[in-house]
Amino acid sequence: MEVCLLGCGGMMPLPDRWLTALLVRCNGSSLLIDCGEGTQIAIKEQKLGFKDIDTICFTHYHADHISGLPGLLLTIGNSGRTEPLLLVGPRGLERTVRAFLTIAPELPFPLEFEEQEEGIRRLSRKGYAITSFPLAHSMACRGYTVELPRAGRFDRSRAEAAGIPVTLWGRLQKGETVIFNGQAFRPEQVLGAPRRGLKVTYCTDTRPLMTMAEQAKDADLFICEGMYGEPEKTEKAAEKKHMTFQEAAMLACRAQPRRLWLTHFSPALTEPERYLPLAQEVFPQAELGEDGKRITLKFEGK
């Protein structure tokens, strides 16, 4: 699973900081979370493609998270995409996107909409799962967890004992149920218990919630709102429904992900590195998000 934080800014793009957006690539699929002004440029800067973007999730519909959508859709269309593109977001998704389509009216691919109502919702995409969950902002807002599961090890002795032809083993390993000579063979007949997969949790524009810690529990990567680094801005963060570095670190301390990336910095936070030690005192694996920050997550043992 390849993860690229395209931008780490909040509210407005700056010359050296694009607005927060995340691109996750796995199984030949590209998932984009949020699409503020400048997202297209950030994608180009990272030499990432547009055609494979088949899912776009939105945390909410403030301009700094969605205003780049019309241009991006046009660019995806110009890339040659004709397959459907799925859009996911809180209530009001289709109404909001349809308004944007007045300036991007003729797309060569259909749009599909998945509006997430209250509570925790889960959907599957090309072998990986997306879980959306409610956050606490000034409007309906949702966080996302992306998980790539990993099947158990193939057990040759069980396959042989069940009399399963060798020619079917590869398909069963991939999780397929196979019908052969009128008999159904299932993956669980030849696979052990599921192994640890890969997991990324992404939350911006919110106050701290236990749901966030639950979603990020044992994640490979937790990307979390850190609009303010200064401790004296804790009250302002609460008023504006945002978070400080230390609050994000406390959530990470509960969740125990392998690493924490802070993101969605205020335009006034010009030196976030000054305040990183405050987060690291609480959660030592805390890091600053940066435009273009990348990581390739791999299964254990690979």
Image (cartoon, helix red, strand yellow):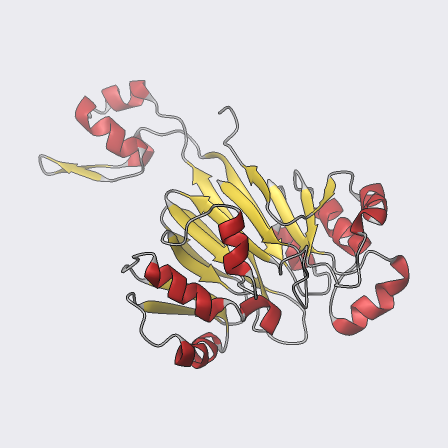
Q: Residue furthest right?
A: 232
Count the numbered circles shown: 0
Answer whether residue 71 is visible to the viewer in this image: yes
Residue depicted at 40% across the width and 81% down the height: 102
Answer whether residue 165 is visible to the viewer in this image: no
Residue depicted at 69% across the width and 42% down the height: 256
Vertical placement of 77 versus 115: above or below? above
Viewer-nearest residue: 277 or 246: 277
Tell me: 21 left or right of 190: right
Q: Residue furthest left?
A: 181
The x and y percentages for residue 198 are 52, 40
Tell me: 4 left or right of 229: left
The x and y percentages for residue 33 are 52, 58
Residue depicted at 73% across the width and 52% down the height: 251
Vertical placement of 130 versus 155: above or below? below
Toward which corner of the image does residue 181 lie, by quadrant? Answer: top left
Residue depicted at 67% across the width and 40% down the height: 259
The x and y percentages for residue 130 are 47, 54
Tell me: 177 left or right of 264: left
The x and y percentages for residue 190 are 31, 28
Toward which corner of the image does residue 73 lie, by quadrant? Answer: bottom left
